[in-house]
Amino acid sequence: MMAGLLGQTAVHAQKVNFTEFDLENGLHVILHQDKTAPVVAVSVMYHVGSKNEVAGRTGFAHFFEHLLFEGSDNIKRGEFMKLVSANGGQNNANTSQDRTFYYEVFPSNQLELGLWLESERMMHPVINEVGVNTQNEVVKEEKRLRVDNQPYAKFADEIFKRLFEKHPYRWQPIGSMEDLDAAKLDEFRAFFKKYYVPNNAVLTIAGDLDIEKTRKLVEQYFSAVPKAQPVMYTKVEEDPMTHAIVDTAYDPNIQIPAIMTAYRVPGMNTKDSKVMGLISSILSQGASSKLYKKMVDEKKNSLQVGAFNFALEDYGAYITYALPNNNTPLDTLLKDIDEEIKVLQTKLISEADYQKLLNQFENNYVTTNSRVLGVAENLADGYTFHNKNTGYINNELAEVKSITREDIRAAAKKYLDPGKRVVLYYVPAK
Amino acid sequence: MRKIILILTGALLLQTSFAQIDRTKPPKAGPAPIIKIGDPVITKLANGITVLVVENHKLPKVTASYSIDGGPITEGKKAGVLNLMGSMLEEGTTVRSKAAFDEAVDKIGANVGLSASGGSASALTRYFDTAFMLMAEALKKPAFKDESFEKLKSMTLTGMKADEKSVSAIAGRVTNALAFGLDHPKGEFQTEESVTNLNLADVQKAYNQYVTPSRGYLTFVGDITPAKAQALAAKAFGNWKGTPLSLEKIPVVQNPSQTVVNLVDMPNAVQSEIRVTNLVNLPMSSPDYFAVLLANQILGGGAESKLFMNLREKHGFTYGAYSSIGSGRFQTAFTAAAAVRNAKTDSAVVEFLTEIESLRNKPVSNEELQLVKAKYNGSFALGLENPARVATFASDILINDLPKDFYRTYLQKLNAVTAADVERVAKKYFNHDNTRVVITGKASEIEAGLKKLGFPVKQYDKYAKPVTESVAAPIAAADPKGVIEDYIKAIGGKDELQKVKSVAITLGMSMQGMTLDVLQKRLAPNLELTTVTMGGNVVNKSLFDGTTGYQEQMGQKREMGKDDIEEKKAQTSLFEQLDYLSDKYHLQAAGTEKVDGKDAYKIMVTLPNGKTQTEYYDVVSKLLVRVDKEQVANNMTVNNSIEFGEYKKVGNILMPYVQKVTVSANGQQQSFEMNATDIKVNEGVTAADFK
């Protein structure tokens, strides 16, 4: 009886409720009410990332993540962040290959301030030489700090430029500093006009709010933003890989080398993308996972080992890596990893391992919904990347549970083909 | 025309329908949200454990943590034992091996972690019991296996080595040691010696003494009822017995009677770490508590604060300058800190002291005060999104003996603070005339400037021990040729050195847990072969055969550059110092500097190709103790510094057996130590080796 009741609470607690509607200018709006704490998150997800850039002008989307804090017709330069902190809030933004996400988290009585800030940013941000020059320096400093100066931080660049030949995933969101230096102000303005428009954005507000009042406020602040041309995007199709690419990359910031492999896999809106996520857990989540237990705890030949599915909209990159311990040659590590993949391709995982997998997934999944900002991003992701299915987070667990052990074996076989991958010896530069 | 009018009307209409908002100004805030802070359900087990339960069914998940309120603990000669003991709790139990324990945790998708002062467990509601019992098992029945102990001890020692040249790590430990004293629990730190001397019995003893139900707080947060949680607590810990714990009596430490500068020399520093610090007593129950929080926020709490605006925005001395102040039952510290460019060290100290003094003597503006109040009000509200916050509030109240409504009236008390309060507490808690300025940096570049500030300047070493000023009068400027001649004499004399036709050195080096073997063969006049192997595989090879050379790494070969070939060719002897005395080289004395705590002559050597390097020769022993070189690779300047030590006789000459290499580029640094296991002179090398 007791257990039954608790079970019910649990199922109920996981469902995320929301209201959604479109403004006439095409802005999609999602509202989620959660009154447990006096906190509200206001976020805008623009469906633009580095894959919308063209070769020779890379780094634009990430550059806009910075540029759109420079102020607007009504917000003086340098005031944007000050307004947030002077009103007890926190804010930030981030950019991926596929989208850019801006947000503020405020005490709930500052909801309107958040709407004003985001609508100002969308409606008439200031894009001028001063801002471009300032942010150009800031972005360079960021690249020095986060990429050039960080051990192993160039791995993504090194892998993606080998795994993709034609698709814009071949460059990273941080882009090329030469491209940014060469870009003219008009080009930045044109990029803004094309992509940072209401019909290419999702406004998600989550937290301690009143749905009807918020709907009215959203209309007041955002309806005045003009509608723009529809955003056209055509996926660049890669030719299938026909052979393994084996190469060496050098990193001056490391002392211990690493061996990495990467496989091209389907994009995030596919069941197979989910399956690849599960395969990562089998291989490397937790101290009892296949690779960790074998290589770190038992053979002690690795300091670190991991596998993960870098899921993106058009394709994904399935990546494995290991750092040697006790002078182990990198080829030994590669062999150890490949052996475990071979097992996944030929044998079904045990029932016990399968249960472990589902439990780990569910635990992670529940945690991502623990804060209203996380809920806001999950809802916006569903709309943007899963066929406008805002409620995707409510089905995700069921979808994962529908994956069988046979699906896992089949996906391992189909995608983790040693004849069609990148093998990268990632070694210290002298 | 008509069309235009229509459009205009349309635009007007559009405007009127949204006339109620004024875009030109930020909207006004709504009424402040009512902040509700629930009370956890608090009970006590018979063995003394306090159990707190915060019921929150938002997510199907429960988190529990066990925390032992042991206060600061003096470790003395056993410094480091508590850390090790904490790590040992994660190495399996008497009923389950480490592998079985990990499997049990992962199987249910849970997280379980342990430390010397407690543990935590979180899991989906349906698996929480299991996760919780695993945490309890690890706390009550640790395996304490020898094998685990040795593994963790060597990892600790390796980790400490990596920090030996880290200026910020040294600054942190020395500042505490100087402020509190080396025999104080907040001043002591683990050393290579203390960790090396630890054994498993020490860990066992520390466990028996400090991991106990006494003064324990067990907190449950999440999808669980108080009744269920209390039953679990009783099941896991009800019968647990342990040593009664009482807080150590720690004497109060005095601040210096006048402002002093303590200087720690780190010759490799490119920035000085400045810490302006004084000790304070600030219990949370103090009537000054809220005013102090705000005063610190105004001074150095963030990027809008005075220190940041002055030292970074106005002067550009640093990437960031901040201050912080501790509070609670025990004596703690106020500290203002920044890492600044060497050349601006003394100027930065002046600005720190000026900002502190100004806060002590001038009331802050209403705008400044309102800004920091808004920040605190906001972050208090935002923090409540975390259900565990309520439990932290409750345990704070218990531990610090605070009134029950402390957090319910928190913002009210904070918002009542006035500008006069801020000034008053700044005077009381942020010292100016009796503070301690600890500088960790390159003494040769910053000491003179610091001495001009008018405060007594005292030098300490990396272990916070005073450095005795060299008794001798200032060392006379050296004649650079004389220094080189003395060195040649010291290692065996010109004649003996010229007899050396070949050298073969075998070195071992360990880097982040890996062991590399280096074999270096050299043949007069300038042939050189270096092979680095890892587990029998060659990972790096470099060769110069007298006319040309290359470097090979992981199968990639790079030919030697023209410049490097020239440099090599200029060498006519295995001991390059013999060449230094010829006209092709230029030598210049550059005073003295400390190397590894000892005075050394600094000599700038200009090579025939125009490149320069800096060499340091010990004033007393005359031996070469360090070489600094700059290299440009891939458009990046790389600084190499090699320290030489443990000179021993090989035949008739002295050779260094230890080489400490530090490579820095882009503000990043890596160091490693190479130890010679074998050095052969005039044997084991033939011309064929360089083919």
Image (tube, coloured by chain):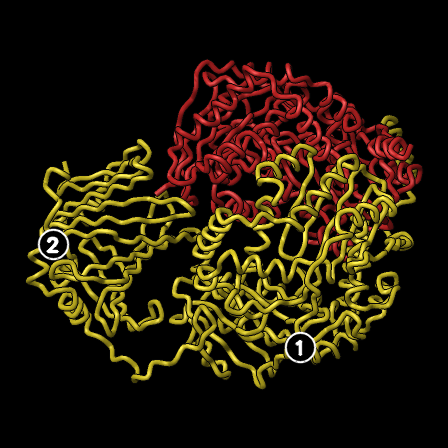
The numbered mark 1 sits on a residue in which chain?
A: B
Residue B629 location (% of width, % of height): 30, 56
Tell me the amino acid under the disc marked 1. Answer: Ser
Residue placed under numbered mark 1 in the picture? B358
Q: Position of residue B494 (x, y in %)?
A: 9, 63
Q: Amino acid at mark 2?
A: Ser
Which image quadrant: the C terminus of chain A? top left
**Image quadrant where residue B91 sits:** top right
| Residue at the image position 28 percent from the left and 36 percent from the top | B552
Residue B682 on image: x %, y %: 10, 50
Residue B316 picture quarter:
bottom right
Between A319 and A79, the one lying in front of the other is A319
The answer to whether residue A247 is left or right of residue B624 is right
Residue shown at the point (79%, 76%) measured from the top left:
B421
Marks 2 and 1, Cα distance to the nearest angstrom? 63 Å
Q: Which chain is yellow?
A: B
Q: Is residue A300 above or below residue B491?
A: above
Drawn side of residue B563 relative to residue A73, left or right = left
Name the residue rendered at 64%, 43% in the picture.
A67
| Any part of residue B383 in sight | yes
Output the letter for the chain in red.
A
Do the CB atoms of the residues marked 2 and 1 lie less than 8 Å apart?
no
Chain of the residue under label 2:
B
Q: Are marks 2 and 1 on the same chain?
A: yes
Which residue shows up at 26% across the image and 70% down it? B618
Percent across and percent down for residue B131 are: 71, 40
Which residue is tagged 2?
Answer: B573
Label 2, secondary structure: give it. Answer: loop
Q: How many numbered marks appear?
A: 2
**The residue tagged with tag 1: helix, strand or loop?**
helix
